Amino acid sequence: MAADEPTADKVPLDSIAAALRRERARTGLSLSEAARRAGVSKSTLSQLEAGRGNPSLETLWALCVTLDVPFSRLLDPPRVRTRVIRAGQGPAVASAHADYRATLLAACPHGARRDIYHVDAEPGTVHASDPHMPGVVEHVVLSHGRARAGVAGEEVELRPGDYVCYPGDLPHVFEALAPGTRAVVVTEHV
């Protein structure tokens, strides 16, 4: 691989570990109680707080809901004046149940509640999301391929350039219908 060829960054385990420890301490939850509420094993949470393991997107979302924090708080990149993330780079986390990977593009600054993700997905499996925190709204703009997205049972088919907005605090799905499907997802915390 050439030195200038883009590669996907690894999951930022150090950032995730520090954020999980900080946010769990903020809530006053024990390791056992936070794991129980999130539906993950105590050993999984312990490993994540120690900066080990390979967390799935679903595990991290469950922990965010339990700790009442936006997902971006776990991956919050350093603040810079101008930020460019080349295709295939950035802090990405993969789903455990679908060929689906979300890359944080921009974390919401303090005082604002918006996160932006670049999503790569392949046909074959549906990425089903449990409800996020109350009031969350998701905006999806499809940039390549075809997909079905939206509240479970009410999905709409999207083609490049199409936009859909739906409540993220209800069960929702994203299903790639064509190889190389890409989208930008904005999560708004109202």
Image (cartoon, helix red, strand yellow):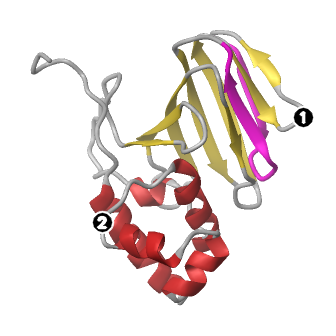
Q: Position of residue 19 (x, y in %)?
A: 39, 68
Q: Which residue is mark 1?
A: 153
Quadrant in which residue 124 is drawn: top right
Give the x, y percent position of residue 29.
55, 87
- Residue under pointer 2: 51
Please indicate whether residue 184 sits to the left or right of residue 80 in the image: right
- Numbered tag placed on residue 14 in the rendering: none
Q: Which residues are magenta?
A: 161-177
Q: Nearer the viewer, residue 118 or 45?
A: 45
Q: Name which residue lies at 39% across and 67% down.
A: 48
- Is residue 104 rendered to the left or right of residue 81? right
Instruction: Characterize the local packing of mark 1: few (<14), some (14-19) or many (20 or more) Cα atoms within 10 angstroms.
Output: few
Instruction: State whether residue 81 is above or below residue 38.
Output: above
Query: Given the image, on which type of amino acid does mark 1 rest?
Result: Gly
Q: Which residue occupies 56% across, 21% down?
A: 122
Residue 154 in the image: x percent, y percent? 89, 31
Is 42 on the left or on the right of 37, as rendered? left
Question: Mark 2 and mark 1: span between their CA atoms?
Answer: 37 Å
Residue at 53% x, 45% y is 115
